[in-house]
């Protein structure tokens, strides 16, 4: 499997009572596929994985696999703070039909680089699914360094990394590790264009929940080296990036999705988007609809 292009880290829709909304979930899946999204992540941090019960996790992943029906890769978030439990969850995702596991660095426990090596090697050695490393220090409290990633690239079951740090130096160090068997994906929407122009294979995006056509087009342009066109399109999404980072993810993206008729809210301790951002939300929502419409019409 060679992951590339626009991969959406899907938000998990809940209904007005706070229960899983599988009807909205299927509509979100179908909208992503129709817009050309090239991969989907189920139950990652954007999907509020920590707030899901096991039957909900199973229902989300099973429904995604059935709906997608092999059209694009389905990645399951399986990472946790304990190696044995992460292996167990990765086996669970494999049994449900996932194509790969997105495995975040162990949150809260802050292992050493040697501990991270041992952690990922143990998961990959189990061989339940191909593993995509996921580094997001702002959420986990530990940083998977490029030299550690370099050691992990030699494992045949470790196929890539989602890197959420935004510094160009970090992405340059990782891009140098790319090969036919190891891909580098941006995990930071505002710098994803720059990362792909520098050689990254694609992006695992929050924004593509609501901008799927725009992100597919951005990835196509940037990966083809069409700098001027890619940067022009990226510039049109700057206010959306600003909104999506104004409160902790996935609060803003779920506010947008709710405005578009997909889902109703979040689970505590996350609260709805603050009322002070209502005007910005409305303006960005209108801009998103206009941009997505224009790209759809251009493709018709």
Image (cartoon, grey):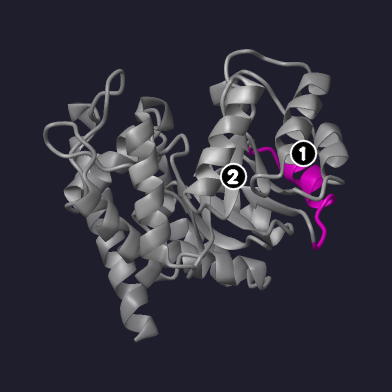
Could you tell me which residue is drawn at 23 percent across and 26 percent down? Answer: 274
Could you tell me which residue is drawn at 49 percent across and 50 percent down? Answer: 205
Q: Is residue 296 magenta?
A: no
Numbered disc 2: secondary structure: strand
Residue 189 appears in view: no
| Mark identifier at residue 42 | none
- Tell whether label 2 touches label 1 (CB within 8 Å): no
Could you tell me which residue is drawn at 50 percent across and 54 percent down? Answer: 97
Which marked residue is nearer to the observer: mark 1 or mark 2? 1
Residue farthest along the top direction in this orientation: 109
Relative side of 250 to 134, left or right: left
Q: Quadrant of the N terminus?
A: bottom right
- The answer to whether residue 104 is above or below residue 84 is below
Residue 212 quadrant = bottom left
Numbered disc 1: secondary structure: helix
**Depth check, front residue: 257 or 96:** 96
Residue farthest along the bottom direction in this orientation: 300
| Distance CA(mark 1)–CA(mark 2) | 13 Å
Q: Quadrant of the C terminus?
A: bottom left
The residue range painted magenta reads 166-180
| Mark identifier at residue 125 | 1
Residue 102 quadrant = top right
Relative side of 11 to 204, left or right: left
Q: Which residue is mark 2?
A: 101
Could you tell me which residue is drawn at 61 percent across and 58 percent down? Answer: 202
Residue 194 quadrant = bottom right
Dot 1, how many residues are within 10 Å of its Cα: few (below 14), some (14-19), or many (20+)?
A: some
Q: Residue 183: x and y, percent?
A: 72, 55
Q: Residue 153: x and y, percent?
A: 83, 45
Q: Residue 181: x and y, percent?
A: 79, 58
Q: Residue 79: x and y, percent?
A: 57, 31
Dot 2, how many residues are within 10 Å of its Cα: few (below 14), some (14-19), or many (20+)?
A: many
């Amino acid at each position: 499997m060679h992951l590339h292009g626009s991969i959406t880290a899907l938000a998990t829709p809940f209904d007005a009572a706070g229960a899983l909304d599988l009807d909205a979930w299927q509509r979100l899946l179908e909208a992503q596929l129709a817009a050309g999204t090239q991969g989907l992540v189920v139950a990652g941090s954007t999907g509020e994985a920590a707030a899901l019960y096991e039957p909900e996790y199973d229902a989300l992943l099973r429904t995604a696999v059935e709906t997608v029906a092999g059209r694009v890769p389905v990645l399951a978030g399986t990472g946790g703070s304990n190696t044995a439990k992460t292996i167990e969850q990765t086996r669970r995702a494999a049994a449900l039909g996932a194509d790969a596991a997105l495995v975040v660095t162990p949150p809260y426990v802050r292992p050493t680089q040697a501990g991270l090596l041992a952690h990922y090697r143990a998961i990959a050695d189990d061989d339940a699914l191909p593993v995509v490393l996921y580094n997001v220090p702002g959420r986990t409290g530990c940083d998977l360094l490029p030299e550690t990633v370099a050691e992990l690239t030699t494992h045949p079951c470790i196929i890539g990394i989602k890197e959420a740090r935004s510094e160009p130096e970090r992405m340059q160090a990782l891009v140098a590790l790319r090969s036919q068997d190891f891909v580098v994906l941006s995990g930071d929407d505002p710098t994803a264009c720059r990362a792909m122009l520098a050689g990254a294979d694609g992006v695992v995006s929050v924004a593509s929940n609501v901008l799927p056509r725009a992100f597919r087009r951005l990835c196509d342009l940037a990966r083809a080296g069409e700098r001027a066109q890619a940067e022009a399109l990226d510039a049109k999404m700057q206010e959306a990036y600003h909104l999506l980072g104004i409160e902790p993810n996935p609060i803003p993206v779920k506010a947008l999705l709710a405005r578009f008729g997909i889902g109703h809210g979040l689970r505590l301790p996350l609260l709805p988007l603050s009322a002070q951002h209502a005007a910005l939300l409305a303006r960005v929502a209108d801009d998103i609809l206009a941009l997505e419409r224009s790209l759809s019409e251009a493709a018709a």
